[in-house]
Amino acid sequence: MVLRRTPRPILISMSSRRHLLDAIGLRLWPGTRFVLHPSESRHTIPFVRAVADPRLWPVGAEVHIGRSVLDGFHPVALAAIANICARHTGKPVQLSTQLTEKDSLDAAHLADWLLTCAAAPSGSFPTEKQTSYLFTSGAHRARAIGSMLEAIGKTAVPHMVDIGTGVGLIPWLLCNGSVGSRSVQLFEPDRKRHVTLERLWAFRQPQQTYTVAPLRAENVPFSTPADLIMFCQCLFRIDSAQRRAVLEKAWQSLRPGGALFVNEMPKQAAGSDLLRDSLIPRDDIVSLMPGTPRLFTARTGWRTAQEPRAVSARSIGSSGLFVSIRPD
């Protein structure tokens, strides 16, 4: 009689630094380790690379999605990861979050989109590194923003505006959780991203419309009354002499009760000298914000408003949200 060995599990972590903690509780030590953030470690494989290469998935292996991913990703993005895992291993991945039928359809489309991006020819957009950043950053920030919107009681966002949207993944995921979402304006100056954006946004609710324009923040007209306007990791790219005017113009276009937020890594939290030089100090971000800005950070699950100047730049990190709400 031939005994067939059970393949060791696959572990998916946010980064190589987190896979040891994510492996706690597994019956077997993982034989294959994928990471959402690309890593130079010879012990881990970028998840996007694995998405495009079925040979990297042991047939019949169980997949364990680590806590570092479960705690930081939008539910639909998590379901898309589980969808891809099931396609490659032939075994379903159980998630604790209950998904609606619509969630499952959205997740399947997002999985298809990620498979297409991961298989992009060498030298085209997006590259493996770009796909890893766009998916991981978008899924994480959509989780943060969704939690913040729930905390401030803003679950319906009829009209949304995203400045420097990339491929539009953040608003696409946010529309999934907003029953009142009807229209979205996307502004992205890099035209090469538009094809990938259009492929993602081809799948949406029938009542939802979107437009995409190749405009920099300084040139956005803000001509349509908005319920939510977001600046994610793009304020530092705006000419310093125009930042206040751009934010003020956005503020004036908000409907009463509308929210303006800036997601920006403060200068002191940067990890390299090159990046540190281009970022904006925390107090400068606060002074640029119209209204009375509050801060939401990962340490409170983005559910507790804090005084921004009372939180260190290191604690704010890259996923902190500076939020101002237009008075009614």
Image (spheres, rainbow, N blue to C red):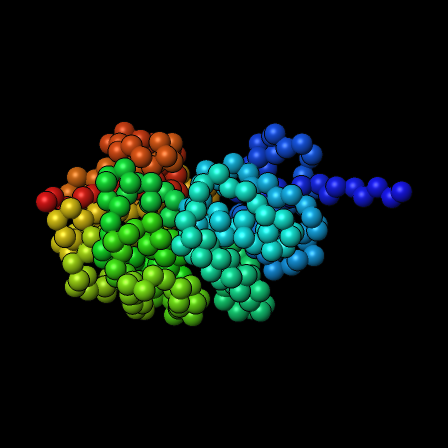
Residue 41 in view: no
| Residue at 14% from the left image edge and 52% from the top image edge | 255
For residue 3, which quarter of the picture? top right
| Residue at 59% from the left image edge and 51% from the top image edge | 85
Tell whether 271 sits left or right of 58: left
Q: Please give the count of numbered marks on the rendered protein.
A: 0
Q: In which quadrant of the rendered image does the C terminus lie?
A: top left
Of residues 139 and 166, the one drawn nearer to the viewer in this rendering: 139
Q: Report x, y in % for residue 189.
A: 34, 66
Tell whether 43 sits left or right of 314: right
Q: Report x, y in % for residue 84.
A: 56, 54
Residue 257 in view: yes
Q: In which quadrant of the rendered image does the N terminus lie?
A: top right
Of residues 166 and 77, the one drawn nearer to the viewer in this rendering: 77
Q: Report x, y in % for residue 23.
A: 61, 34
Tell whether 192 sits left or right of 25: left
Of residues 188 and 119, the one drawn nearer to the viewer in this rendering: 119
Tell whether 244 sits left or right of 77: left
Residue placed furthest toward the left: 328
| Residue at 57% from the left image edge and 64% from the top image edge | 119
Q: Report x, y in % for residue 294.
A: 23, 37
For residue 242, which quarter of the picture? bottom left
Q: Is residue 29 above or below residue 38?
A: above
